[in-house]
Image (cartoon, grey):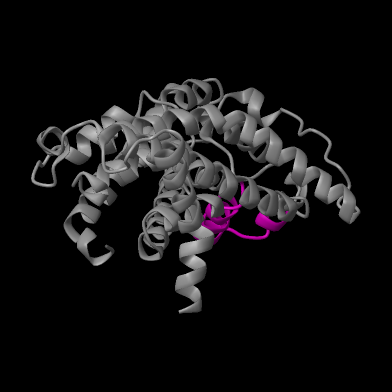
Amino acid sequence: MIFAWLNDQLLRMEWLSYLVKLLVENVFGLSIQDRLGGGLHFFIYDVIKICILLSVLIFLISYLQSFFPPERTKKILGRFNGISANILGALLGTVTPFCSCSSIPLFIGFTSAGLPIGVTFSFLISSPLVDLASVILLASIFNWKIALAYVVVGLILAVTGGTVISKAKLEKYVESFVFHNKMLKIEPEHLTTGERLRFAKNHTEEIVKRVWLYILIGVGIGAAIHNFIPENVISLLLGQDKWYSVLLATIVGIPMYADIFGTLPVAEALVAKGVGLGTALSFMMAVTALSLPSMIMLKKVVKTRLLVIFAGVVAAGILLIGYTFNAFGYLFM
C-alpha cells in the first residue's frame, strides 16, 4: 500500500492532476469531460509533471555523473572485451541523459580515446533510448512493468547493435579525424560536494533549456490526439489489427527530432486511443534513436556504409521490438 501511494503521488502526481482539474473547472470554466477542457487538463498536467520529474531526476543523475568523467569511464571500459564491454557501454548510456545529437560528441571522445567502435555504438544507441529519467517517466505514465520491459529491450538492442558492428570490423568506415581527435581536458575527479552540486545544477538547467520546447510540442500533440482526433481515425491508421502499424510508426518517427521526454506524451495518447503498445514504443524509439538530424550529424564522423549498417540494425531491432510488444503487450498492461 505504501509503494502504491508513493507511485500515485510521487510519480503519477495525482495531487497535481486534481489541482489542475480545479484550475480548469474553476478558473477557465471548462469541464474536463469536454474536449477543450480535457485537452487543457492533459496539456497543463503533463507539462508540469514531466518538467518536475525531469528536473529532479536529471539533477540526481548529473550529480552521479560528476564521479565518472570520460577518461575515467574509458579506463573502466578498457578493462573489458567482447560482449561484456558492449554491455557496459550500453549501461553507461543509461546514466547519460542526452538526446542522440548530444551523444555524438561523447561517441567521438570515446572512440578517439581508444575504445572499440562496437562499444561506442552500444553507448550511442542506449544513451538517447534508455536512461534513468525516461524509466521513471515511463512508469509515471504507464506502469513499472512496461518501464522495465522497455529498459530490457532497449539494452538488448544497444548490445546487439554494438556487437554486430564490432564483429563486422567496420573501423575503416569511421572518419580518420575521429581517431586523432584529442579529448578535451576534464575537470579533476576530486571535486568538492559544492562543486558537484553546481555541476548538477548547471547540467540540469542546460538540458531543461534544450528540451522544454520539445516537451511543449510533444504534450500539445498528445493532447490533440487524446481529445480531438476521433478514436476510429487513429484505429484506421495505427490500429493493432493493422500489420503495417509498427512499420508506419517507425517511418513516421525517423524525420522527427525530439528527446524521449517529448515523445512520451504522444505515446501515452496513442495507447489511450487503442494503438498497440509496440506501435507506440516503436514511434518513440525511432524518434529518439534514428532521428534525421542525428543521422546527419553522425554522417560527419562515419562513412555511408557504416551509417547504413547502423541505421539498418537499429531499425530492424525497433521493428522486432514493436511487433513483439503488440503481440504480447497485454501481459504488461
**In-image side of 148 versus 271 (left or right):** right
* Residue at 10% from the left image edge and 42% from the top image edge: 243
* Region rendered in magenta: 75-96
Dominant secondary structure of the residues highlighted in magenta in the image:
helix
* Residue at 48% from the left image edge and 55% from the top image edge: 135
* Residue at 55% from the left image edge and 48% from the top image edge: 119
Q: Residue furthest bottom?
A: 1
Judge by depth and name the residue closer to the eye, 319 or 26.
Answer: 26
Q: Position of residue 294 (x, y in %)?
A: 49, 27
Q: Quadrant of residue 206?
A: top right
Q: Position of residue 208 (x, y in %)?
A: 62, 35
84 part of magenta stretch: yes
Q: Quadrant of the N terminus?
A: bottom left
Judge by depth and name the residue closer to the eye, 125 or 50.
Answer: 50
Q: Position of residue 273 (x, y in %)?
A: 21, 44
* Residue at 63% from the left image edge and 45% from the top image edge: 55
216 part of magenta stretch: no
User: Is residue 292 visible from the viewing direction of this image?
Assistant: yes
